[in-house]
Amino acid sequence: MYPIYNILLIVTSLFLSPFLLFMLALRPKYRKGLIQKLGFLPEDIRALLKGRQPLWIHAVSVGEVMAALPLIRELKKKYPGEKIVISTVTDTGNYTARQQVKEADVVVFFPLDYPGIVGKIISQVNPRLFITLETEIWPNFLHELNRHRIPAVMVSGRISSNSYRQYRFFSFFFRKVLGNISFFCMQSQTDAERIIAMGAQPDRIRVTGNLKLNLNIPIRIPEDRQGIFSKLNLSETQNILVAGSTHRGEEEVILTAFRELKKEFPDLVLILAPRHPERFPEVAALLASRGFRSVRRTEITPPSEAGDAEVILLDTIGELFTIYSIGTVIFIGGSLVPIGGHNVLEPAIYKKAILFGPHMDNFLEISQILLEKGAGICVKNEKELRAQARKLLLDGDLRESLGKAALEVIEENQGALRKSVEVIEQFLTR
């Protein structure tokens, strides 16, 4: 089956090559890391890894990198002599790993899944163990790992309903692919059942939970919040609506709801954080066209005044997590449009009232738990977003109740990290 997969891969690549070349020419982000994705690591990285067998941890983008952080710290604490390599697919994930994961010795881009490329990279890195977060299944890469007798472990594994349907259709192939993975640490029993149906061996599977439920719960002192308010030139008495990780089609809905809420809550400020940095200019133009008084986060330089801005456009990377701590009401983007949602647990750490849309397939289990525990509210459209935000702005006790329940969800699921490390240690002590 691998020859057929590779023929299809090459044919598809050739068919899409004009479009890919066009995107490479016009979009700088597609060029970042391209040399590494083609199998060429810089000389300094090759020299650092020469003669070593590092732990290779793969995290697709920002969310997976942040979820991997406590795992990496725990492994580094238990095995201080081990080198750690982190790979990502996206540029923002790569940037976040370099900025946030100080325990990593090397941060690289994950290679394209072509036989010659993955073989070259694996030979250069020569990992002792490969650990992949969530559902990263690359047939050629995993096949090459197995050929080199390098064990692979999936942690915090999940199979969304859409992915499950697609994988099941090609189960005859994925049964062979999954045979190259040494162990599966799945988020839930449903995920475990799905990957078994796809062809994974039941004795290689353990339900360990979701690493994103193991985010460190920080102890926030008043000075932290005061500092954030100061940086944004905001008052601690203001009502703040934070809309995090938004996508095209959501900002319009949020702005419509916000305009109506401003009529009743004149001091309300919106902090709008688009998910993708390349959309910052687009969203800034949208704000201008809608007549909002707005300012970019990068334009605010305390102690200068931010003016009378109604909306702060968060055009930075890595700051949203702490911004959640000052929000009165939080909305999680990627959920009013069919993207699959984003991490609802980051604001939960700060005991915040959380709203999200109906499209939470990427965080289905977490969002369902929040709803069941009375720790979150699902809104389906602008009308519901406005109504629920209004209710929360008016009712401090309700906000406190939701926030407390959200934090309890995290505290009750802290075992995922320990269980995942227990599985990984089996492969490091052999």
Image (cartoon, rainbow, N blue to C red):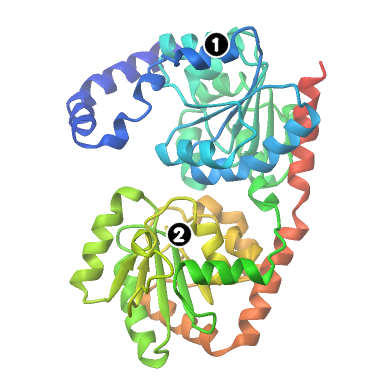
Of residues 185 and 278, which is closer to you in this image? 278
Amino acid of disc 2: His
Residue 193 shows up from this direction:
no
Above-or-below relation of 414 to 59: below
**Res. 151 image quadrant:** top right
Give the number of the disc on residue 219. Answer: none
**Left or right, 136 with reference to 301:** right
- Residue 335 seen anywhere in this rendered image of the structure: yes
- Callout 1 amino acid: Ala
In the picture of the structure, the residue carrying the numbered disc 1 is 47
Indicate whether 6 appears above or below 135.
Answer: above
Residue farthest to the front, as pictured: 303
Rendered residue at 43%/20% (across/down) = 113
- The disc at residue 359 is 2
Residue 254 lies in what quarter of the image?
Answer: bottom left
Q: Mark 2 or mark 1, which has the lower sequence index?
A: 1
Counting other residues with Cα less than 10 Å from the Cα at mark 1, is it few (<14), some (14-19), or many (20 or more)? few
- From mark 2 to mark 1, how far is it between C-alphas? 45 Å
Could you say which is closer to the camera, residue 43 or residue 419? 43
